[in-house]
Image (tube, grey):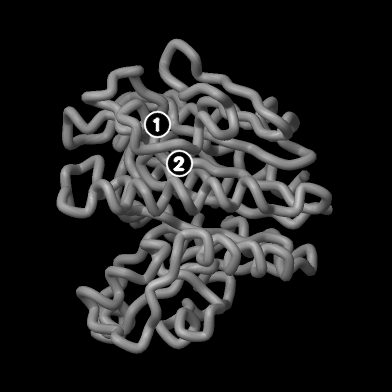
Amino acid sequence: MSHILLLFIDGVGIGEPDPVKNPFFSGKFSFFNEFFSDTPHLLKQNLSGDQIELFPIDARMGVEGIPQSGTGQTSIFCGVNAPALINQHFGPFPYSTLIPVIKEKNIFIDFLKRGQKVFFINSYPQVFFDYLNSGKSRQSVIMLSYRSAGFELNTADDVRRGYSLSAEITNRVWRERLKYDDIEVITPEKAADRLLTRVAEHDLTVYEFFLTDHLGHGRIPHDFDIICSDLDRFLTHIFKNFNRADSDILLCSDHGNFEDISIKAHTFNPALGIAAGKNALQMRDMIKSLDQIKQVLLGV
């Protein structure tokens, strides 16, 4: 049984090889060339490296319309074809009738039923807990899944002690905009090392990065280059330094968006998938659509 790292990177598909539209062709990312000596695009959707495989994942799953986060993430984390269940793509939060499905079928619960250890490494600032305590309940699929499995979300204290990560990797936004003056800004490499430490301690570790979706929607353009650089360095360090002898990584997304910044909407493109480790080929061959991810991870 492997230690599994699930890297959920929101809103990233495989797009056109156009440096104007597609940031992966703009020179802002070295990750793909580092591991594949190439960059994926619609005419080259599969790439292979040393125990690492890049491949497309169907985000539409036979349902008309543009893929959305609520149904896409439910499909990933619960192993169901969520858009087929409600006959539409829906987001950004889960559709009301999918909430019971999430609470019953999410991947954290399935790992726990087998006596295995799980960890969702993201931390949330106090302003989010104030939101929850006010009686408001809109939560992402991942957050709802983890809490439904009986866990509390990580807080600022967990970031301070180096146990968890902020959603933007380095804590820069927490210091600059949320005024957490006592939380240090760390390098993407140090964040990656903290993540890999948690991976070694758990059977399933999940990290969510959603700023790619924000950038794809045209938000926070002033931070575009910083966010791209942080993500590139973070992922490169993880894939270079994880323990290949007893760990597997699956990077996946819920829909396309970031790969085409010429528009501010999601795309019909396949979602990006990257598998690394001793079971990389198995994951590549078995994962064709978002709803197959959970069951494959339970089997590696």
Q: Residue at x 25, y 49 (%)?
A: 214
Where is residue 65? Give x, y as percent: 29, 27
Q: Quadrant of residue 125?
A: bottom left
For label 1, the SS is loop
Q: Earlier in the sequence, mark 2 or mark 1?
A: 1
Up-down: is 147 above or below 35? below
Q: Which residue is mark 2?
A: 253
Q: Would you say the residues marked 2 and 1 are in contact, meaning their CB atoms lie under 8 Å apart?
A: yes
C-alpha separation, residue under disc 2 versus residue under disc 1:
7 Å
**Which quadrant is the C terminus positioned in?**
top right
Left or right: 229 as drawn, with respect to 108: left
The numbered mark at residue 289 is none
Where is residue 220? Give x, y as percent: 18, 53
Camera sees residue 199: yes
Q: Nearer the viewer, residue 270 or 292?
A: 270
Q: Which residue is mark 1?
A: 13
Up-down: is 247 above or below 160? above
Amino acid at pointer 1: Gly
For label 2, the SS is loop
Camera sees residue 66: no
Where is residue 71? Give x, y as percent: 39, 44
Q: Nearer the viewer, residue 164 or 228?
A: 228
Where is residue 124? Give x, y as percent: 38, 75
Dot 1, how many residues are within 10 Å of its Cα: few (below 14), some (14-19), or many (20+)? many
Q: Residue at x 49, y 50 (%)?
A: 8
